[in-house]
Structures are given as C-alpha cells and as structure tokens.
Amino acid sequence: MDDKIWSALALASAWACATPAHAAAAAPPQAAASTADADRRLADAVMGWLDKILAVPDTPDVDPPLHDAVQALATDHLARMRRVLPAWIADEHAHAAPAASDSDIARALHNRIVNEIALWRLESPGPAYDAILLRAIQRPGLCDLKPRASYLGLLQDVFQAVPPADRPTLLAGERTLLAHWGTPRAGLAPAPASSLAEDEAATIARLRAGAQDPEAPMVPVLASSVLKDPPAEPWDSLTCARHQWGLAQALRRGDAPAQALLAWRYATIRTAGDWMAADGNRGATEYPLTAQRNGVSGWVSLRVTVDAQGRYASAAIADRHLVVPGVRDNPPAAFATVFDTASIAMGPSRFKPVTPKADGSPPGPVIMKIDWSLQ
C-alpha cells in the first residue's frame, strides 16, 4: 500500500486555489468554479488510490473463474465509488469548520475512506460467510503465500483456500460488505476487552519464561522468531502466522468461534497508522504523528494498578473518546488505538500517588483521564 496517500490527497486539493470550503456557496462564479475543480481533482486522486487498493492481481495459482468474480467485485465497487464520491466530498464541505481549507476537506475524506476500509474488514455479512472464512484463514500454508499489494489480492488467496462450492457465499458476502460503504454500521461488534495481540503476547511471555507448550502448536518459523531473545522483528508472513496461531489458541481454549473470529478481525485490520510513515524520533509521550496529521483529538482513560505504597505500578486502557474529521456516523475503528501507546507512556508522570491502605494491601485501581487536544 502507498504510505503517502495523505500527501497525495493534500496535493490534489492544493492544485486548486485555497478558497475556504464554506465560501463556495457565496463565492463569485470564478471562485466557485475553482472549488469545483479542486473537488474533481480530489475525487480523481481518491479514485487512483482506490484503484490500487482494489487491484486484482493476475495470480497463476488462482482459478480463473474466481479471479474473474473478484475482478467483477472490484469493477462494480469502483464504479459505485466514482458515483458517490462527489456526494461524500459535498458532505465534508457541509460539515467543515468555517475556516476550513481544501486540504482540510482532503484530510476529512482521507479519514473517512481509511475508516470505511477498516469497517469493511470488521463487519460480518452473516454466519454462513463467517463459518467458511474461519475455516479458510486456518488453512496451513496460507501465511506462506507471496504477500499481495492489495486487499482483493489477499482475499483471492483466502477464497482460493476454500472448496469451489463455498466461494459464492464468500463473494456474496463481499458484495454486501462493499455496499455498506458510506452507511452507519449500527450493529458493529466492539473490540474484545483483551485483544488477540495481547493474548498472544501473554502466552509468548509465559513460553519465554519456561512454561509448557501452548494449547496450539506454532509453525517452526514462528516459534524460531518469537522465542528469540530479543524477539525478531515481525514481517508480513510472520504476523499472519502469529495471528493464525493466536486464533487457534483461542478456539482450543473454548472461545466461541464468532468471538475468536472477531478478535482476529480486529487484529488484522489496517489502522490509520499503517497508511503513513512511522512516527520516527517523536518522543513516546508526544502527540502521536498519526493523530496530528489526521487531525484526531479526544481523550483516553487509564485503569492504573497501584502498589501497596500507593504508587503507580502499571496501566491498561479503560476507555476512549475520539473526534476524527470525516468520521461521524460510525465508530472510528481505524483510529481507535491512535493515542493508546502515548497515553500508557504518559501515565507514570501524570499519576498522583494515593494514600496507602492501613492493612498494607494494595489500593484498588485508579481511573486517570488523559486529554489530547490539537489546540
């Protein structure tokens, strides 16, 4: 994927004059025409991006009928997005602040689409689809396939892993999910309290400390990587294998299949931070670059565990509230964790010790709220 998509959208909007978005309706004809031209350029830039995301690679090991069916999905959805983008851009103008610029409109649209992509992969089109998908993503060797540079390229691999008789159910489910772009997802299940990545990390920590073998065996390349000291840096196929193993762990310990699949979905979506370069040398407690560049603000509350002396011991995320330009009618799934790491890092310096208990036992957890504002 292109990590510079935000720059591309901002550039597309900057090609035209920087007339404030709110002024379009009252602007003279020449200025209104310039704003309309900027909107067309922005729509073209977005379509160029989506065309890459939804590209269907010509892969020799994918059955031609399956490839053609996935290509038809992409073609139909791209045509739909070309039709609806002008309305989405107009909607961003309508919700923009009075002093908003064309780049603000581009940023809001970028956020909206990044979030739609995340929602697309989180939402379930029904139990029949989910049952087939759950079997497909557990197939041995799936993570060894060559990485694909597009979402539909990845889906092709998953769909190829199921019997041909099951593929129509998956394809119909994808059509349903793509048709939901731009609509409220009222029934979207929230992320599990404990993420798949957290469960995997806890099990790996126990293994590294000498615990017995996990419920589900690791493939050799994953075991070699995660049990090294220090652990090897993850790469695409290892990340895939780790989440495949984490899913198998959850199912073996008795998690409901629907809940295990939901945890896997949240672990594998592309978040806002995945669409741009890393935060670089920015300090651990500074405003995260992903949040700053996407205009995200809000607050995070921490549940702080306190030791017997009333001092900070550790913390976990208790709750969040985010304001994301362009994301209004759906949860900001792609942005949900954007402040988590920085908030945890900031916890010790913000914490005020509490009075120890007379009996020497640790006080109960303390809820601490950390505000993040761009002002």
Image (spheres, rainbow, N blue to C red):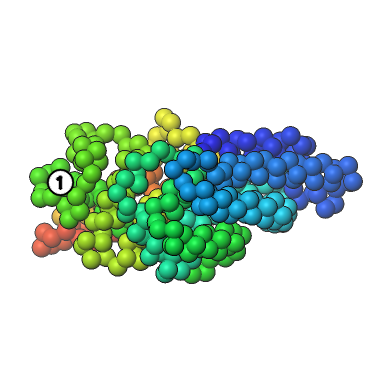
Q: Residue at coordinates 22% horizontally, 61% vertically from top-left?
A: 252
User: 64 and 374: which one is in front?
Assistant: 64
Q: How many marks?
A: 1
- Secondary structure beneath disc 1? helix
* Residue 295 spot, x, y in % from top left: 56, 46
* Residue 183 spot, x, y in % from top left: 60, 64
User: 22 and 222: which one is in front?
Assistant: 222
Picture quarter with the C terminus: top right
Q: Is residue 316 visible?
A: no
Q: Residue at coordinates 40% horizontally, 38% vertically from top-left?
A: 146
Position of 41 compared to 252: left or right?
right
Question: In this view, which residue lies farthest toward the right?
Answer: 29
Position of 184 compared to 264: left or right?
right
Q: Which residue is mark 1?
A: 207
User: 100 and 108: which one is in front?
Assistant: 108
Q: Is residue 112 above or below residue 364?
A: above
Position of 367 compared to 19: left or right?
left
Q: Amino acid at mark 1?
A: Leu
Label 1: few (<14), some or many (≥20) within 10 Å?
Answer: some
User: 110 and 322: which one is in front?
Assistant: 110
* Residue 73 spot, x, y in % from top left: 58, 54
* Residue 23 spot, x, y in % from top left: 79, 49
Q: Is residue 160 visible?
A: yes
Task: Name which quarter of the figure residue 8 lies in.
Answer: top right
Task: Name which quarter of the figure residue 107 lies in.
Answer: top right
Q: Residue at coordinates 16% horizontally, 52% vertically from top-left?
A: 214
